[in-house]
Image: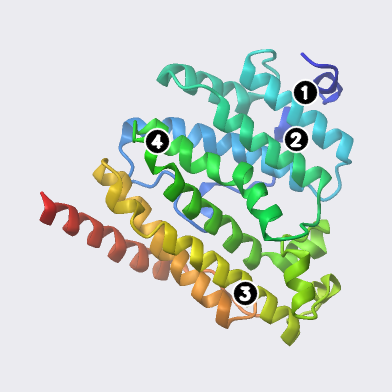
Amino acid sequence: MTALAEQAPRAAGAAALASGKGHKDENFPVASLLIRPEHRAPIMAFYRFARAADDVADHPTAPPVEKLARLEAMRAGLTGESDADPAAGALRAALAGRGLDAGHALDLLEAFRRDVTVNRYADWDALIDYCRYSAMPVGRFVLDVHGEDRALWPASDALCAALQVINHLQDCGKDYRAIDRVYLPADRLAAHGATVDMLAAPRAAPALKAAIGEAAGEAEALLARSAGFARAIADRRLGMEVAAIQRLAESLAARLRRRDPLAEKVHHGRMEALMIAGRAALGRMIARSGRA
């Protein structure tokens, strides 16, 4: 175990900083009932690991040195150097059971280390590089669990990056006020005459609203690149889930171009989300049946 990992409190691991948030609290489906039962366990193990690491990185009062030590303990748990972190140990066992390596989870930890040490992004390319570690490994892992062709990774990457950007935009005010983190690229803010401190207001100023709208448009461009992803997936049930996620994301991105996330509700209500997702999943199933 590395020296940094040894600095983390041993008693509770990352769980000591848990937010209490679970997979049902996320904006998009996580291992829903559409996913085949044999695939849900490793996906949920990956989610719980990611949730634990995210809670560490986003904890509002823990000092950075403690956060980094806990994240390092999670890395050591993934690689088998330590058994101190339960979420890391559970994921390591799940990966071993499926003959998968820890590469995607290790990439994810890089994003959470950045969350501890980086709180501003200069431009869109810097944000997408962050998404390369914070979002894209999730989709790649799910595809690998299902044994899908890695030629699908570019479409998956585009969808996952769009989901990440959408989440950032929905939470832009809360992230700034609670943890002083801003994902809106600085150059986009400046281009519209917006400033970071505008995120603290109860309502977005026109300049800030324009910057948010532009970023939402960038997310829509990513979603255009992933539009054929669901149809290309061999596993019918995974294809239905991806179709549902794609449609939910398209709906939210469109809302973010119109609504003010500082003052208005952007996310879907439960029944609304079920209706949007259900129609998309059914459309994917019918299209697949027609081709068959």
Residue at image point 84% right, 23% down: 4
Quick check: 250 above or below 25? Answer: below
Q: Position of residue 144 (x, y in %)?
A: 41, 32
Gap in Å between the C-alphas at discs 3 and 4?
31 Å
- The mark that comes first in sequence, 3 or 4, is 4
Total residue callouts? 4
Can you tell which of label 2 and label 4 is closer to the viewer? Answer: 4
Q: Position of residue 41 (x, y in %)?
A: 42, 31
User: Looking at the image, is mark 2 or mark 4 earlier in the sequence?
Assistant: 2
Question: Mark 1 and mark 3: span between their CA atoms?
Answer: 45 Å
Which residue is the site of mark 2? Answer: 16
Q: Quadrant of residue 270?
A: bottom left
Q: Amino acid at mark 3?
A: Glu
**Residue underneath mark 3:** 214
* In the image, residue 72 above or below residue 236: above
Left or right of 140 on screen, residue 185: right
- Amino acid residing under circle 1: Ala
Whichever of labels 1 and 3 marks the residue nearer the N terminus, that label is: 1
Image quarter where the N terminus lies is top right
